[in-house]
Structures are given as structure tokens and as C-alpha cells.
Amino acid sequence: MRVESLRETQSTEELVKLGFFTDVAKAIVSCKTLKQTLNEVMNQIGSIFCPRNWSLLLRHPRTGELTFTIVQGTAAEELEGKKVEKGQGIAGWIAENRVPLIIEDVSKDSRFDNTFDENSGFKTESIIGVPLISGGKVFGVIELINKLEGVRFNALDLKLLTTVTDFAAIAIEKAYYQAGIRRMANMDSLTKVYNRRYFQFYLTKEIERTKRGDVSLSLLFIDIDDFKKINDNFGHVAGDDVLLRITKVVSDSVRSSDLVFRYGGDEFVALLPNTSSEMAKLLKKRILANLKKTQEEIETGLSVTLSIGVYEAKGEDSRELLRFVDEDMYMQKFYKQEREVMDVAENIENELIEPGRLE
């Protein structure tokens, strides 16, 4: 009777454990984005282990450097974004050796580095940490410091954390690949900037934001002049090179808060949040100035010019806004052609070579 009772108790405990890990796994894998997944992993760990401080550090694939990406608990603000050199401290050791680790008393372990304690004013006593591994490579470390009730972490804590981290690594890997697929769907394959499909989504989002608050929004509509002639005269390889170089000029000229999209074959759009028409015109001048500086790098004998339309949103919907900025761009192109016609000294020789070009 006692044996049966003991077996029933053990079975109940196993079911409770299984139910616990099932709930944790469901909570983690139900997240739809990489950011949500990382945050949920950390929330679950916080509720299970009750540490004073717990961190997710992501590892740079080339340098091996770790970054405190998500930090919760005591001294979180002081740690978030800080770098850990390859092999430095407990987290660095875990990443390099690829094994879980528990240290019940860090004062007795030579691997412990108190640099972050000194900078944050936090006192580390006990640590457990587990590597995050995908495809046989370590991409991060989860580290827990000090239990709330003052007791030290133990072997059971490490076993539980390792199990939870196995779930987490699978969910993070899945979210990462899903994010990559979405990014590829929203990105132009040649220039690696966002494509027209994503532009439509983002423009609608930004227009709604301007309507909710007193914020400005401007657009630059950028067209490569006579791009068909570049392809016809120099070939499509040269044309692709021009597209890549123009992408770099535009991307390097705008601010980090701005977004660049390839709108069509030879057309780009720069979306400029919190930007007035005057500020947008300054960015236009910067793009043209930078293009002029790099003109010699594009290709000997190949002259590339841009027509850039500028328009600040005034409550229009996305279709109207695009029409207005497109009209401004074509107006710029018309003025260029008009100047070409009027400048006889510059163009009479070309007209003799290409009869009817200016008709």
C-alpha cells in the first residue's frame, strides 16, 4: 500500500513538472517576433528563479564579444548595452567553453570579474549561467545573479535553467529565422534597402502618426536620370553598379532615423519622419553634393545625375502624398531638360551628333 502511494506521489510530481515545462514552452513559442521571444524568455526565468538580476547577453559571431542585450532586476540600467570582451568573466567563460556553470560563492572563483559590480554598485554573490546554442554555435548566454531570498543557487536551479534554456534556444532560433524571412520579403534583393511593398506599409504607418500628433513628415522621391541609356550604352552590370552606388550615396546622406526604399527600377524614396520641407531640402542638397564627390568613383566616362522631388505631408493619404512628391520630382527633371535646350553652347554639338534629340 505504501509502495503504491509512493508511486502515485512520484507520478503526480512528474505530471506537475511536465505541466510546468509545457506551460513555459507554450508561453515562449507563442511569441511572434524575436523581441517578444527574448522578453518572454526573460520574464519566465524571472518568475521561476526569482533572481535579483538576470541578463541575456548576445554574442558577436566574429569577435566573440558579448553584449548585455536584455537586463532585468537590480542595476539593469547600468548594465544594458555594456560589452563583455571575449572570455571575460563568468559569462565570457561560459560562452567560450559552451557549458552551463554554477558558482555558489563568486569570491572563491578566479573566473569572476568584479568590473561591472564596481561600476554599478551591485554586489554579486552567486551566479548560474547557461549558453544559448544554435547549429552548434553559441549565440548568447543567460546569466542569473543572487536569489531574492538570499540563498545561493544550487544544482537543481542549474538543471532547471538548462531545461528552460533549451526551450528558449529553439524558440529564439525560430523567431530569428522568421524575422529573416520577413526581412527578405521586405527588402530589395540587389540594393538591400527596403522595397516598394514595405514602403507602402511604412508610409501608411507614418501618416497615421503625423495625424495623431503635431509631428512633420517629408519625402524625397529620387530618380536616376536617363537610366535606360546607362543600361543600353554601358550594359546591365554597369547599371546595377550605378544602383548600388546611388543606394550608398543616399543611405550615407540621410539620418539614422530616416528610411530608404527602392521604389522602382531606377527610383528610390527616402521617408523622413519629424522632418519639415526645409530640412528635407537640406538633405536633398547633401545627397547631390555627396553624389558629386563620388562621381569619379562610379565609372570613367559615365555621368550620373539625379532628379529629387521634395514634399512635406499636409494631411494627405498615401496615394496623394506620392502623387505630389512624384510631380515635384518630374518638375525638377523638366527644369534640367529645359536648361539643356536653352544652353546652345553646351548642346549644339550633341544635337549635330544625335539629330532630333531635343525635339
Image (cartoon, rainbow, N blue to C red):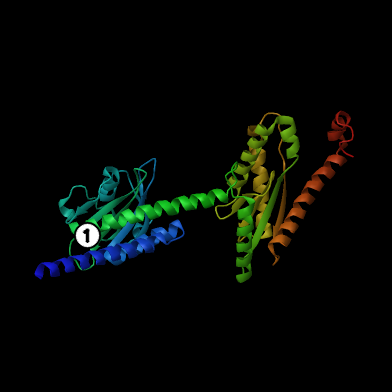
Q: Residue at x 69, y 64 (%)?
A: 317
Query: What count of labels does the image hold?
Result: 1
Of the pair 121 and 193, the residue shown nearer to us: 193
Is 63 placed above or below 32 here? above
Residue 322, percent across and down?
71, 57
Residue 117: which quarter of the image? bottom left
Residue 275, percent across and down?
63, 59
Task: Say whether residue 338 is visible.
Answer: yes
Q: Residue at x 35, y 56 (%)?
A: 168
- Identify the residue under disc 1: 157
- The N terminus lies in which quarter of the figure? bottom left
Q: Residue at x 56, y 55 (%)?
A: 257
Going by the numbered disc 1, the residue's amino acid type is: Asp
Of the pair 42 and 161, the residue shown nearer to us: 161
Of the pair 17 and 65, the residue shown nearer to us: 17
Q: Judge the density around disc 1: few (<14), some (14-19), many (≥20) Cα neighbours within 10 Å.
A: some
- The C terminus lies in which quarter of the figure? top right
Residue 35, percent across and down?
44, 58
Q: Secondary structure at mark 1?
A: helix
Residue 158: which quarter of the image? bottom left
User: Left or right: where does residue 181 sit relative to residue 162?
Assistant: right
User: Left or right: where does residue 66 sit relative to residue 235?
Assistant: left
Task: Say whether residue 118 is visible.
Answer: no
Residue 55, percent across and down?
32, 57
Is 177 placed above or below 217 here? above
Residue situated furthest left in the rendering = 2
Q: Residue at x 32, y 45 (%)?
A: 85
